[in-house]
Amino acid sequence: MTAFFMRYCKRIKQLFSVIGLVLFAHLSFAAGNSLHIRSANLIVYEDDYLLNADAEINFSSEMEKAILKGFTFNFLIEFQLRSPRQYWFDDEIVTTAQEVSLSYHALTRQYIIARNEQQRSYASLDEAIEDLSVIQDLKVFQKAHVDKGERYQALLLMRLDHKKLPKALQTEAMGAEDWKMTSQRFAWSPNLFK
């Protein structure tokens, strides 16, 4: 009877350990920053190729507090088109970057997303992050840059631009995990001539 009870207690202890680890991992993931590109594709419009992509973005509580204090966060969307070479470095065809900024306006209590010359205002941070996470119709290159019959590889990266952070945050951001926001390098082989 005692042996049965000891095995029963040991299994309960293991079960609680597993549940604790799962909860800890979930809470630590939810508390931090994350930036993950889910999908990307290229579409042709007249003589241009346009990039459409979707990302998943989560801010840490530290970043949310900084936004409310009036700090502006600049994100870089970096696109590159390469022609793979078998025995040498890949041939870089096009490199394009776009800056998108997120800020909070205290007087109007609105979050502002600025892309190029356009600004959009949102009542909540979640709505602003949703806009930030969608890349739509970004002109990345022209038809004249690519040749029919050639294979190409497209690469997309999105990241928080630490160089544009205010000096007060740059030193804090250097080593802190709360301020690291860089997506994976999303790569795909686009079919440019459908």
Image: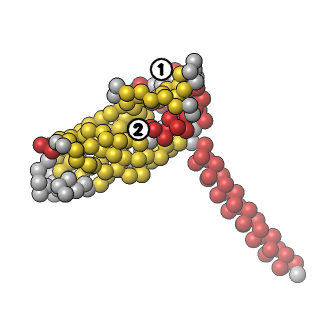
2 or 1: tag closer to the N-terminus: 2
At x 45%, y 38%, the residue is 131
Residue placed most toward the observer, 150 or 20: 150
Q: In the image as oriented, which residue stretches furthest toward the front?
A: 46
Across and down, in percent, residue 12 comes to 77, 68
Residue placed most toward the observer, 28 or 43: 43
Question: Circle 1 sits in a helix, a strand or a loop, which is it?
Answer: helix
Residue marked by disc 1: 167
Mark 2 neighbour density, 10 Å: few (under 14) some (14–19) many (20 or more): some
The amino acid marked with disc number 2 is: Arg
Question: In the rendered view, does 11 fall on the left or right side of 133?
Answer: right
The amino acid marked with disc number 1 is: Lys
* Relative height, residue 193 to residue 100 (above, below): below
Across and down, in percent, residue 115 comes to 37, 30
Rounded to the nearest angstrom, the CA distance separating label 2 from label 1 is 18 Å
Question: In the rendered view, does 35 fall on the left or right side of 16?
Answer: left
- The quarter of the picture where the C terminus appears is bottom left
Q: Which mark is residue 62?
A: none
Q: In the image as oriented, which residue stretches furthest toward the bottom?
A: 1
Question: In the rendered view, does 44 fall on the left or right side of 6?
Answer: left
Q: Are marks 2 and 1 in contact (CB under 8 Å)?
A: no
- The quarter of the picture where the N terminus appears is bottom right
Q: State whether residue 108 appears in this view.
A: yes
Question: In the rendered view, does 46 fall on the left or right side of 14?
Answer: left
Residue marked by disc 2: 159
At x 26%, y 56%, the residue is 189
Across and down, in percent, residue 19 comes to 69, 60
**Tag count in the figure?**
2
Question: Circle 2 sits in a helix, a strand or a loop, which is it?
Answer: strand
